[in-house]
Image (spheres, helix red, strand yellow):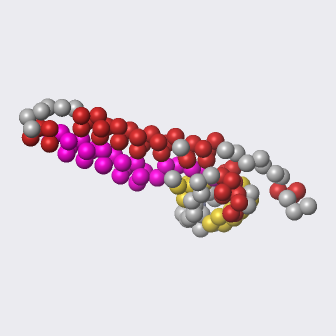
Amino acid sequence: MKLYTKCPSCKSDFNLTKTYNTRPDLIADKGEYFNLNCSKCGTANEYHANDIKAKESYFTNFLGTILGLLVILITTKLMWNQGIISNVGLIIGGSIIAASNYSSLTSNVNAFNRYRATRVPKQNINK
Ligand SMILES: [Zn+2]
């Protein structure tokens, strides 16, 4: 999972250097308001914790997909060598692929994006 936000200066998305599993973790570490330097244009801007969004890092899904494809290939080849034409490999491999893409899409990313901090007006924070 990666956390990113949109830079108001150059309008491009950039990733946070640190990743938190939940928005409260992010707030506990950085506070509700914090400054971030855009990795694209270098401009420092102030962000609210709710401005941060989570997305799946495709690398994890990619690994799961590769693993699933390997299982399909190996199982199918083993079965084939034994004279059995079977879709067992397809089923197992397919479920690995589905699980690796599905679980990551539903778990942390959704939880992070669903959770919204109650936005405290900034001028009241230090009173
Ligand atoms: Zn920027």
Range of residues picked out in magenta = 52-77
Quarter assignment of residue 38: bottom right
Tell me, yes or no, if residue 8 can be seen here.
Answer: no
Establish if 5 lies above or below 111. Answer: below
94 to the left or right of 102: left
| Residue ranking furthest to the right | 127
Give the image location of residue 68, x and y in percent: 30, 44
Membership of 61 in magenta stretch: yes
Nearer the observer, 6 or 18: 18
Foreground pick, 30 / 122:
30
Q: Position of residue 18 (x, y in %)?
A: 57, 63
Main SS class of the magenta portion in the image: helix
Residue 48, image x, y percentages: 71, 55
Left or right: 118 as drawn, with respect to 106: right
Residue 126, picture quadrant: bottom right
Residue in the image at 59% along x and 57% along y: 20
Q: Is residue 25 visible?
A: yes
In front: 11, or 121?
Answer: 121
Q: Compare residues 35 and 22 and report the one nearer the observer.
A: 22
Q: Quadrant of residue 86?
A: top left
For the point 70% across and 45% down, the residue is: 116
Was residue 54 drawn as part of the magenta stretch in this picture? yes
Circle count: 0
Quarter of the image for the C terminus: give it: bottom right
Residue sitting at the far front: 82
- Name the residue rendered at 78%, 49% in the picture: 119
83 vs 16, left or right, is left
Left or right of 23: which side holds 87? Answer: left
Q: Please tell me which residue is depicted at 88% across the width and 56% down the height of the picture.
A: 124
